[in-house]
Image (cartoon, rainbow, N blue to C red):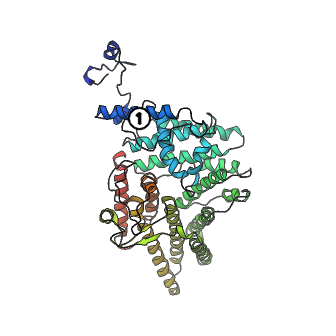
Amino acid sequence: MDGKANQCDEATPKCSYCEKKQVPCHRPKSQFDLAWRDQNAVASNAVQRRLNANDRSRRHQDANQDLVKREDQVPRVIPQDFENYALNFFFGSYGRLAESSDRCGYLGCLYPIWTKTPPTSPLRPAVNAVALALLEAWSWSNPNSSQSLARPHYVQGIVAVRRRLQSGEDIDDDDLLATLILDMYDGIISFCGGRPHDGPHIAGSRALLENRQRRPCTTEKSQRVLNGARNMIISRALGQKDSVPENVLIGITNVQDLQRTSESDLEEIQFEVANLQASAARIMATSEDKDTSTMDILTQCNELDRRLMTWSSSIPLEWVPTCIWDQGSIPQSVRNAGLYQRHCTVHKNIFIANMVNAHSCSRIRVHLTMLSCLGHLQNPIFELNRTTARKTIQDLVDTICASVPYHLGDRVGPQRLDDKTTQYPRVGASPTADEHYSTAACFGGMFLGKRLAELLQPGLPLRNGQREWILGQMGRIKRIYLATAQN
């Protein structure tokens, strides 16, 4: 069909009209194609010409470093080669932004590992699934749809991972990384669908991690992948109040000649917090001698809280968030969109902001466990402890709420990934870093949504009206990413 929609008879592979005219048939092949049709044919052709020119100019570059074109914009017209463009978009936006930060975890080493994987690696279909799901989401299509192009690749990735587990062979970094990417896909689908991310790949990840940890970890890339797998398992245990097997941390002792990081230190403490939560829940439900057991849990809580405070005082000074109050640093549009109390915080980058908020959530869990235990001790001498625990939780919740403007700026609805009209809080006259426009758009909503959801867990003593404010901000995140429209 050459622009006259009423001439097409829907025959395949070409309509008879175009066959007779001897012109290419451009009829949309699926609902995904329909979502990408541009009303302006001139603009459409111009975009396609630019993509073709970029493809020709990069085709002969080094194979290892340029297996894909690294685009960082959502196209206005979907190219004919869906899968390759999705990879271009993913590595050119999410991958490039992650590589630019040394605190982005496993995503920062994904591209170098991906370029060296064989076609049979489970990492290949896993990356394809995430790339297509993100492209569909940013095109305001629906990655949850039965017609999604991402789903078949996701299924292929799961099959490939299972095949690797059943083979009995040694697990490599790309195999373990594949489970992280598959989990990322599930997170995207859950986020877009407005439902909790229950982590269906935890069992497989544990088995792969146990196999991978049998061999020494000698490179920074391997360490990042191992840390990513452990973090995924520990985070899920924290959310579900499950215990974490001891062998999850074995890999730390297998790391050779690699420097310990603040991330791994925090991860070890979170491992103990998860097991403490699980122990406390079990004791409260089954133990007959609750007083003795409760005192033991309280002692562990105090020790873990001390370690968490030590961690926050030992991080680099540039990681410490800057608290800003003045009118000039917080644009009025940001205040209107969502400002809790009268101040907010600015961080070095979105990845460090996420880590700082994860630390606050861990302390909240420790103090919530304290409150649960103190509730079983009727002695009035513990009333001061209960008051202190509640106040500490409220202060920590306040710090997470104060980070909302840094993550979302003044966005209240859908915007393009490459939109730089968004305003963010800033320190004094310093302009918003160019990188933050993209990292906040790519990662801000998912990072923040996860932390805000943790603040709504039962029993958390929030300030008056704070729960409603948090719910309002979660609704805002859904509107920005059109999540509610895809339920």
Q: Up-down: is 78 above or below 308?
A: above
Q: Nearer the viewer, residue 146 or 438?
A: 438
As drawn, the residue found furthest toward the left would be 6
Badge 1 crowding class, 10 Å Cα cut-off, few under 14, some 14 to 19, many 20 or more, is: few
**Residue 8 seen anywhere in this rendered image of the structure:** yes
Q: Is residue 178 left or right of residue 49?
A: right
- Expressed as whole percent of the image width and height from the top left, the position of residue 474 reads 38, 58
Indicate the position of residue 477 as horizontal and vertical percent values. 37, 55
Residue at the (34%, 25%) spot, across then down? 27
Give the vertical position of 427 relative to 413 (above or below): below
Q: Is residue 83 visible?
A: no
Q: Position of residue 394 (x, y in %)?
A: 44, 74
Amino acid type at image mark 1: Arg
Name the residue: 37% across, 32% down: 33
Q: Nearer the viewer, residue 186 or 71?
A: 71
Q: Residue 25, located in which quarter of the rendered image?
A: top left
Report the label total.
Answer: 1
Placement of the N terminus among the 4 image quadrants: top left
Q: Residue furthest front?
A: 57
State the residue position of label 1: 50
The residue at the point 64 percent across, 35 percent down is 118
Task: Please give left or right for residue 167 compared with residue 146 in the image.
Answer: right
Looking at the image, residue 67 sits to the left or right of residue 3; the answer is: right
Relative to the observer, which residue lies in front, 346 or 157?
346
Considering depth in this image, is 250 or 39 the residue closer to the camera? 39
Circle 1 — which element?
helix
Residue 173 image position (x, y, % from top left): 65, 46
Left or right: 25 as drawn, with respect to 128: left
Residue reaching furthest bottom? Answer: 381
